[in-house]
Image (spheres, rainbow, N blue to C red):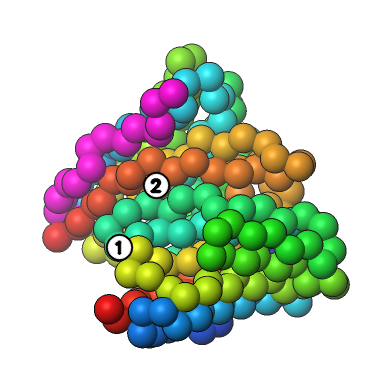
Amino acid sequence: KAGVTQTPRYLIKTRGQQVTLSCSPISGHRSVSWYQQTPGQGLQFLFEYFSETQRNKGNFPGRFSGRQFSNSRSEMNVSTLELGDSALYLCASSFRVSGANVLTFGAGSRLTVL
Amino acid sequence: GQQVMQIPQYQHVQEGEDFTTYCNSSTTLSNIQWYKQRPGGHPVFLIQLVKSGEVKKQKRLTFQFGEAKKNSSLHITATQTTDVGTYFCCYDGGSQGNLIFGKGTKLSVKP
């Protein structure tokens, strides 16, 4: 099975721009989670989608949004970029093990905001 | 969700030495997971523990879940340069897709 695929891997934007990141989960997986990773804050949950529905959302401003398509591919969008949005954005497929979600992460999209 | 605290934040060891990282919570956890992230890479799932006092081994790695299910540890015996990376503990708090991660322990190994 192919793993989790994220595109683009690297991108540079300037303040005020917007960005869209894409994620294709493991084939057959319907749950996709997004995380932001920064040196200061660590790994922080953004949102989770299942069958095109957002089931959970982390504590991020409304500039961060996402969606999931019928083929389970997901996109996240960040509008009006700020310097602090520079981070590694990780997408993950999740599967249940002993009643808990276990994550398989993609390689990430590294966003630099100038 | 409740935070999990990891100590130490950084650990530098000589190759062949042992290494231990600890994960502590103030509340009882239903599960604990460990992930490893190599430099420049992404987190990779290592293991999940769910039972009180559970101990699991993967080659040179030993994982423990405390009796009270409030702490966990990862011990690496005779570290190798391939062990370099950041080790994260986390738990599934029950909200869909939302795992609560510790800040990680960054391990460096000097050959």
Residue B57 numbered mark, or none: none
The magenta region covers: A1-15
Quadrant position of residue B5: bottom right
Position of residue A83 relative to residue A5, above or below, is: below
Which SS class for mark 2?
strand
Question: Would you say A106 lies left or right of B4 here?
Answer: left
- Can residue A67 be seen? yes
Which SS class for mark 1?
loop
Residue A90 numbered mark, or none: 2
Residue at 73% over, 48% down: B94
Residue A19 pos. (x, y %): 25, 41
Position of residue B6 relative to residue B46, above or below, is: below
| Image depth: mark 2 or mark 1 in front | 1
Residue B26 pos. (x, y %): 75, 77
Viewer-closest of B43 and A22:
B43
Image quadrant occupied by the C terminus of chain A: bottom left
| Kind of residue at badge 1 | Pro
Label 2: how many Cα within 10 Å (few below 14, some 14–19, many 20+): many
Viewer-closest of B81 and A44:
B81
Position of residue A64 relative to residue B28, above or below, is: above
Q: Which residue is mark 1?
A: B39
